[in-house]
Image (cartoon, rainbow, N blue to C red):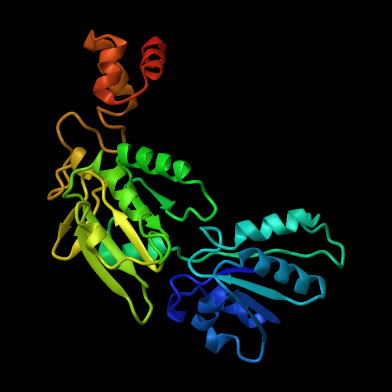
Amino acid sequence: MLVGLGPGSVEHMSARARAAIAEADTVIGYVTYIRLVADLVQGKEVIKKSMTEELDRAIEALARARLGRKVALISSGDAGVYGMAGPTFEVLFQAGWTPPSGQPDDIEVEIVPGASALNSCAALVGAPLTHDFCAISLSDLLTPWPVIARRLDAAASADFVVALYNPKSGRRARQIVEAQRLFLAHRSPDTPVALVKSAYRPRQRVEFSTLARMCEADIGMLTTVLIGNSNTYLRDGLMVTPRGYANKYEVGSGDTRDGEQAGRSLTSGLEGWLAALRASGENVEALARRYGLPPQYIAAALARE
């Protein structure tokens, strides 16, 4: 069982996560995660591993399962979001495992979802993820930096709200500075930023900053950095990203704005935008510059009936 613990506090774990740990004969995890569930693992075989021993955890889980033991392999957050689900399946497939076919010695795998850090941190600061967002890890232990940098640049230019995982450690202090530099090429220095450390744990810390000043904050491996988009704002200690209702409705009254229809695409939605393209009289290159889209996409859009 690949168990997502959520932020770490027992009250924020799912009922299924608690039940899975209760059912397990063996619990395997990073030593900090084991500490989070110490009261739930008493009387069980507990195998603690260090931060960089993810593959070892998965190999150990497979070995115990082959012995007929029921294993809970735990991750903080969600096991499928920068968690143990990926490396576990890699180990299983390498060992020749296939999904159970009903044979008595088949090894079954269950994934127990949990709230990832971005969910937990967002809940503490308001509603920063109400519109499109993405998550990017700044850890270059397994991913080449040019790949990370391209993703940061693309997300910044596309105006995503971004959750940065693994932003800084004792040996990786420059990555967050490079990320800031890439974002400042596309975003205002005043863009709101929330920095949440150890969400829902005893040493929880929440700090608000701006894109220009975020690197002055106390950032570590237990910090998640939420960078707003061009519409995100801070008000009364809350970080909010509008969903776009004001484009269609008078927010105070709920009345539909002139020219818009409830339940229908915006007048600037796909069909309205295509009509505006055709009526503009501008060439492909000019339209591509205006909308920040590839010329070939604009040309194809104009060619479609």
Specify whether 145 is left or right of 3: left
Q: Residue at x 79, y 59 (%)?
A: 100
Residue at the bottom extreme, as displayed: 43
Counting from the top left corner in percent of width and height, residue 19 is at 60, 78
Tally the numbered discs: 0
Name which quarter of the figure residue 274 lies in: top left
Residue 86 higher or lower than 46, as above or below: above
Nearest the viewer among 132 and 269 is 132
Counting from the top left corner in percent of width and height, residue 114 is at 50, 66
Specify whether 43 is left or right of 4: right
Residue 249 higher or lower than 235, as above or below: above
Nearest the viewer among 51 and 285 is 51
Residue 247 higher or lower than 92, as above or below: above
Residue 135 higher or lower than 293, as above or below: below
Name which quarter of the figure residue 302 lies in: top left
Specify whether 24 is left or right of 80: right
Specify whether 158 is left or right of 50: left
Nearest the viewer among 58 and 293 is 58
- Quadrant holding the N terminus: bottom right
